[in-house]
Image (cartoon, rainbow, N blue to C red):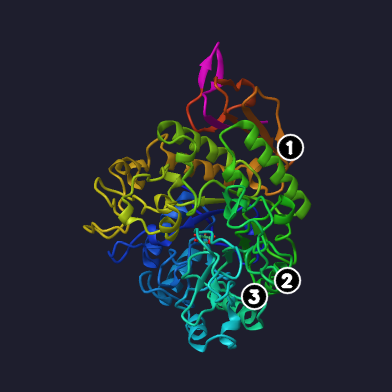
Amino acid sequence: MTQNTPRTTDDATWWRSAVVYQVYVRSFADANGDGIGDLRGITQRLPYLRDLGVDALWLTPFYTSPQIDGGYDVADYRDVDPIFGNLDDFDTMIGQAHSLGLRVIVDLVPNHTSSAHPWFTAALAAGPGSAERERYLFRDGRGADGELPPNDWESIFGGPAWTRVADGQWYLHLFDPAQPDLNWRHPEVRAEFEEILRFWLDRGVDGFRIDVAHGMIKEEGLPDVGFGMLIDGRRQSSMLGSGRLPYFDQDEVHDIYRAWRPILDSYPGGRMAVAEAWAETPQRLARYIGPDELQQAFSFDFLDATWEAGSFRKVIDTALAEATIVGAPTTWVLSNHDKQRHVTRYGDGEVGLRRARAAALLMLALPGCTYLYQGEELGLPEVLDLPDELRQDPSFLRTGESRDGCRVPLPWEGTEPPYGFGPAGCDKSWLPAPASWAQLSVAAQTGVAGSTLELYRSALRIRRAHPGLAGSDDPVRWLDAAPGVLAFSRRATPDAPELVCVVNISAAPAPVGGYGPVLLASAPPTEVDGEIALPVDAAAWFERE
Ligand code: BGC
């Protein structure tokens, strides 16, 4: 079983090849039996994460919040919401994580606060023209009586990005009306967040995931997008990552990160930040990374790749080329709390699971930092049939699209929902887990040869130990392969053994005779015409001298 060694504080580049496990706090483990995951639940389950073999945890927001958007609506950035515990629970959790060799990254939500944040309630009370309103983006409306929103911006959650308050002014919210956008040209806003960074760094966090990192600065004058809320019949938000919008990826946002980097660097042990940023081109995304800005930005192109060899090949080549330009390894991610789980994206059911297992071996063989989303190691699918009345995603009410199906609490053990999510005998969970998840629980898969959990454990163990996989910067060397088959090798030094990864996305078994002994396979290799072959929708790692 993999045992992480306790971290060394001088390993400042740990994040370059780390495997980070995303904990969606309200759905990971519930220690107090209220049906909602909490910090003490995480602490109890830390040995599971150590044994899985990950290097770090990323915790979604656990701060004081009305929970309108799953905690991405923060009312107090320096405290824990009572549903998740308190600051002592946080200190215990991080202390134990560190002693098990696990680092901890927390989510920072700087683009907007909650409407319950004292700054926003003060802004509402103080009225138009007040200093309090300056911390947010309040504007007069258009039309004869200011009855129209100040511009044509659309909320990511659907509908106008503006809400009118009682005195007639409007305020901007790129997400829910309960998430007013801050004015990042205000020095007090900047100073406050620098203090918030220090607050958590002082408590020992190893890094931050920066929410909506591309959104804090809006173009001066807040100009119209120009096409109304629909562009060529598509919602504005469908331009995320492919078109220019006056509220995203403005050059000035980089000043903020240039101010944050010295703060991160002033603490020992390689404190880092990863941007959740969407930009028009990979080149613009790369601008968030560098020695004077952030260490990483999520590359969502891998997640968006379709189940085709060409699609993966293109995304991988682009990401590796960008990494070379910026001098920092890329990040790989297949699922997170905002996206349909990849088992389902790849076809659901048996086919989806086969492909998801293969995709995991592909991802974990690539150089750089990998982010896993809780439950992918169990092969969990999206829960598609949640009753509407239980769905809590604010975008569901406005657009009919809901992210609840990837947020269902984890199944740990037992035969009945919620499968050990809470303490013994507790039958509560904030979203119901399906009956089929009994076979997918941690207990049901532990020690079972060929289970998805054991596949991930083996993959992470080999990734940690094999010289071909350990480095963050070794080149990927593509090997000749049949159409629809991806094959590449990695070798750290000329005399170290080579690791070959083959993924069969074609319609026929792929001969893999020449690659050496199999280290790990997502499906058992077969024999075709006396030669060893990799089945369709499978991946394998080989060791070649
Ligand atoms: C988070 C979402 C959240 C949104 C608003 C996203 O980047 O991942 O879960 O709804 O930001 O904070």
In reply to whether residue 415 is colored magenta, the answer given is no
Q: Residue 402: give x, y in percent of width and height.
A: 43, 52
Q: Residue 87: give x, y in percent of width and height.
A: 43, 76
Relative depth, front residue between 325 and 407: 407
The residue most toward the front is 144
Relative depth, front residue between 82 and 70: 70
Which residue was labeled with disc 3? Answer: 184
Tell me which corner region of the image, top left, top right, bottom left or bottom right, holds residue 261: bottom right
Q: Residue 394: give x, y in percent of width and height.
A: 43, 61
Q: Residues within 10 Å of mark 1 (few under 14, many from 20)?
A: few
In the displayed structure, 110 sits above or below 394; it is below
Callout in the foreground (2, 1): 2
- SS assignment at label 1: loop
Which residue was labeled with disc 1? Answer: 495
- SS assignment at label 3: loop
Relative depth, front residue between 473 and 195: 195
Q: Residue 140: give x, y in percent of width and height.
A: 59, 77
Q: Is mark 1 within 8 Å of ligand 1?
A: no
In the displayed structure, 465 sits above or below 11; it is above
Which residue was labeled with disc 2? Answer: 255
Q: Which label was assigned to residue 389?
A: none
Relative depth, front residue between 504 and 204: 504
